[in-house]
Image (tube, rainbow, N blue to C red):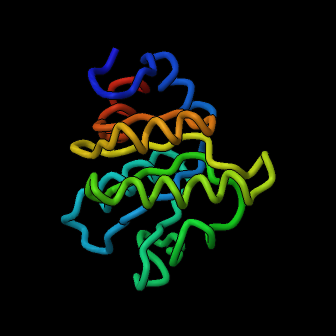
Amino acid sequence: MPTSTSSLTDDEIRSIFKTYRRIAVIGLSPEPDRASYGVSRYMKNNGYEISGVRPGGPEQILDRPVFESLAKVPGPLEIIDVFRKSEAIPGIVEEVLQEVQRRPEHERPKVLWLQEGVTHPEAEARARAAGLQVISDHCILKEHRRLMR
């Protein structure tokens, strides 16, 4: 089992990768040398549908749409992958919880994924209490490579 504030087992994380195909990437950078760009490219190349969330960002990154906010991302929100500093997480969780309340059940976020080095135990607990699966301080690319070979 991974060491993090996540309580999910490898089998549960593997199930997330098999079940959910849509990833909204908060903090997706248009710069190819940034982690969010490389990780998103990898996930896209492995069959996941990527949408970027970047206020004031370009309209597209990696030939995928970029939105001003999570609320503007159409269709189901399955995995919310966060490339932001830990201190931004409470505000992001608030935005995610608004989407949980606003969207019909089949379009609600299912997974909050906080990248390596990103944790906020109180905000993570709020997301879990709202029914989301939470993975923190783990790279989605590394976990996908490790579990989905």
Q: Quadrant of residue 111?
A: top right
Q: In the image, what residue occupies the spot 43% across and 39% down?
A: 124
Q: Quadrant of residue 113?
A: top left
Q: In the image, what residue occupies the spot 58% across and 31% down?
A: 18
Q: Position of residue 137 (x, y in %)?
A: 28, 38
In the rendered image, the vertical position of residue 131 relative to residue 70, given as above or below: above
Q: In the image, what residue occupies the spot 37% across and 50% down?
A: 42
Q: Position of residue 49 (x, y in %)?
A: 56, 55
Q: Quadrant of residue 58?
A: bottom left
Q: In the image, what residue occupies the spot 44% across and 16% down?
A: 9
Using the image as rendered, state which of residue 49 and residue 118 is in the foreground. Answer: 118
The residue lying furthest to the front in this view is 122
Number of numbered discs on residues: 0
Image check: 85 left or right of 101?
Answer: left
Q: Position of residue 13 (x, y in %)?
A: 48, 26
Q: Position of residue 1 (x, y in %)?
A: 34, 14
Using the image as rendered, state which of residue 76 and residue 134 is in the foreground. Answer: 134
Question: From the image, which quarter does the C terminus lie in?
Answer: top left
